[in-house]
Amino acid sequence: MALAEQIKPITYLKSHAAEIVKEFSANPEPIIITQNGEAKMVVVEISQYEQQQETLALLKLIALGRKEFAEGKFSDARSFIEEMDD
């Protein structure tokens, strides 16, 4: 579905909330809500939100790992395994 079709004014959200919830089962595309012609929020289906949160958490872990690697805070695999065996 085209993004333009997913942009709705806040009045649509207020008057069609139950319908929006029902539609998510058939069309889980996010809905962009505008107020005074300006995008203010995005309404997404809960499983999609949870998936986005998990993705963000993984990306944060990767960024942290890259930062620690750049700072020299790492050990080789053999040392790590030996440390785990102790």
Image: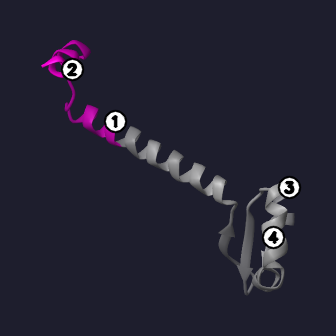
Asked whether residue 16 is drawn in magenta, I would say no
Q: Which type of secondary structure does the marked residue at label 4 adopt? A: helix
Among the 4 quarters of the image, the one containing residue 35:
bottom right
Residue sitting at 20 percent across and 30 percent down?
72
Quarter occupied by the C terminus = top left
Range of magenta residues: 64-86
**Label 4 – label 3 distance at C-alpha:** 10 Å
Mark 2, other Cα within 10 Å: few <14 / some 14–19 / many ≥20: few
Q: How far apart are marks 4 and 1 (CA)?
A: 41 Å
Q: Which mark lies nearer to you, 2 or 1? A: 2
Real-space Cα distance between discs 4 and 2?
A: 51 Å
Mark number displayed over residue 82: none
x 40%, y 38%: residue: 62
Question: Three-letter amino acid code at disc 2?
Answer: Phe
Q: Nearer the viewer, residue 77 or 85?
A: 85
Q: Within 10 Å of the Cα at label 3, are there few (<14), some (14-19), or many (20+) other Cα atoms?
A: few
**Which residue in the protein does label 2 denote?**
80
Q: Which of marks 4 and 1 is in front?
A: 4
Q: What residue type is labelled 4?
A: Ile
Q: Name the residue under label 1.
A: 66
Residue 83, above or below 65: above
- Asked which secondary structure carries label 2, the reply is helix
Q: Mark 4 points at which residue?
A: 20
Question: Does the residue at mark 2 contact the one at mark 1 (Cβ under 8 Å)?
Answer: no
What residue does disc 3 label? 26
Q: Which residue is drawn at 83% across and 85% down?
A: 15
Q: How far apart are marks 3 and 2 (CA)?
A: 48 Å
